[in-house]
Image: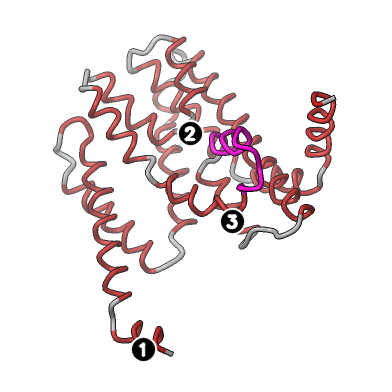
Amino acid sequence: MSQLNAITNIRNLFKHPEFRLGATHMSAVSPGLAAWGLMTGVAMVNSGMSVWEAIAMSLLVFAGSSQLAAIPLIAAGAPAWVILATSFCVNLRFVVFSAHMRPYMMHMPLFKRLFNGYLTADLSYVLFTKRFDKPASDEAGQRAQIAYFQGGTMLNWASWQTASLTGIALAHSIPTTWGLGFAGILALAGVASSLASSTLRRVSAVVAGAAAVAAFALPFKLNIVVAIAAAVALTMLMENMSATSPAAKDKGSK
């Protein structure tokens, strides 16, 4: 009976209009993400990873930015702690995403929350939070939000994995003149532009970029860690200064 209910719930999810809407919105950006996934698949094999290792990394990690950060470190024989620390820092933004998404997901069982966490990516988070600015308070609204979320994330996952696995299979056949690395940069630039919705976020992006360039000579791509640390430190300082400013105090006393 439980299996029958699960199948029914899945069918209802796919038929929900918000599921189709989420997939439609994601389809507008999925070609760029697919190009990024294709480039990541090629990069994994060309870095010296075996086909099976690359497939496992694509399916289990499913985080393009941290994969691209870890691949050259793995190829260079960097210590495991450097690889893990770099990947951890690159993916720190998902801690913020998770904290924001928590009210939307807490009505679901743990397994489903973990599954949705695995599916979450930058643009799926951006599209979802633009569509729903606050969690629904009723069951129908919650169902609609989850349907939209999974419509976008499932299409994103499918397009990424298809492109990544294609890149793995054709790694030695795809010419570097295709400029797939630049396509990945464009995809990341689009994500950054979508998220830079406040002065604080724009300042942190500029600081991170400047720090990454200034520390570019560091080995093992440690300039990425320096950039993230600099941006986080500055934004925390700016938030504390804003909270302790006279204007903020006057507003809080009213």
Could you tell me how far apart the alpha carbons at marks 1 and 3 are, in whole angstroms? 31 Å
Residue 200: x and y in percent read: 36, 66
Task: Look at the image and say whether residue 113 sits in the magenta stretch.
Answer: yes
Q: Which residue is rendered at x = 39% and y = 23% of the image?
A: 43
Could you tell me how far apart the alpha carbons at marks 1 and 2 are, in whole angstroms? 48 Å
Query: Seen in the image, is 162 located left or right of residue 68?
Result: right
Judging depth in this view, the residue of 203 and 81 nearest the camera is: 81
Which residue position holds label 2?
36
Residue 110: quadrant of the picture: top right
Which residue position holds label 1?
250
| Residue type pointed to by label 2 | Trp
**Pointer 2 local density, CA inside 10 Å: few below 14, some 14–19, many at least 20:** many
Residue 1: x and y in percent read: 85, 24
134 over 67 or under it: above or below: below
Q: Which residue is rendered at x = 75% and y = 48% of the image?
A: 143
Q: Say what secondary structure mark 3 lies in.
A: helix
Which residue position holds label 3?
129
| Residue type pointed to by label 1 | Asp
| Residue type pointed to by label 3 | Thr
Lower position in the chain sequence, tag 1 or tag 2: 2
